[in-house]
Image (tube, grey):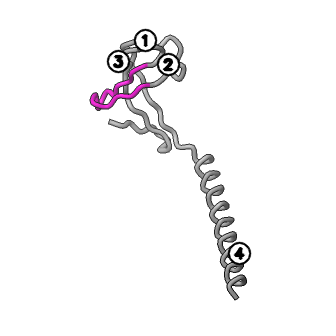
Amino acid sequence: MTKHTKDQDTSFLPAFVDRIEDEVAVIILSDAPETQFNLPIQYLPPHVAEGDHLRLLFELDIDSTEATRNRVAALQSTLATETELATETETTIKL
């Protein structure tokens, strides 16, 4: 079960380290044991060991999301302008 914090922009999932193989931890979600994934141990807290329980924190990065949306909108605008110019050029050439 996903737990929400007081700040609705974050939530966390309980999980545990099932095993560590070749510097890669196999993480299993506590509430959904059929769901597991591999994660290089460099991304985990120091001294993490097999059997340790974790809280996987998810936080919305609103600033990054907004910057990406703005960048995509600018690219779309540029492409639309270039498409319009190319269409006008094709029309001019055909005449």
Quick one: SS at disc 3? strand
Amino acid marked by disc 4: Leu
Q: Position of residue 52 (x, y in %)?
A: 39, 15
Amino acid marked by disc 1: Ala
Separation of disc 1 and disc 3 at Cα? 9 Å
Mark nearer the viewer, 4 or 1: 4
Q: Residue at x 48, y 15 (%)?
A: 23
| Residue denoted by label 1 | 49
| Residue denoted by label 3 | 18
For marks 1 and 2 on the same chain, the one whose residue lies earlier in the sequence: 2
Q: Residue at x 58, y 47 (%)?
A: 62
Q: Position of residue 78 (x, y in %)?
A: 69, 65
How would you rate the neighbour count of disc 2 (Cα within 10 Å): few for under 14, some for 14-19, many for 20 or more? some
Chain part drawn in magenta: 25-38
Quick one: SS at disc 4? helix
The answer to whether residue 42 is left or right of residue 29 is right
How would you rate the neighbour count of disc 4 (Cα within 10 Å): few for under 14, some for 14-19, many for 20 or more? few
Q: Position of residue 69 (x, y in %)?
A: 60, 56
For marks 3 and 2 on the same chain, the one whose residue lies earlier in the sequence: 3
Separation of disc 4 and disc 1 at Cα? 60 Å
Amino acid marked by disc 3: Asp
Q: Residue at x 43, y 11 (%)?
A: 49
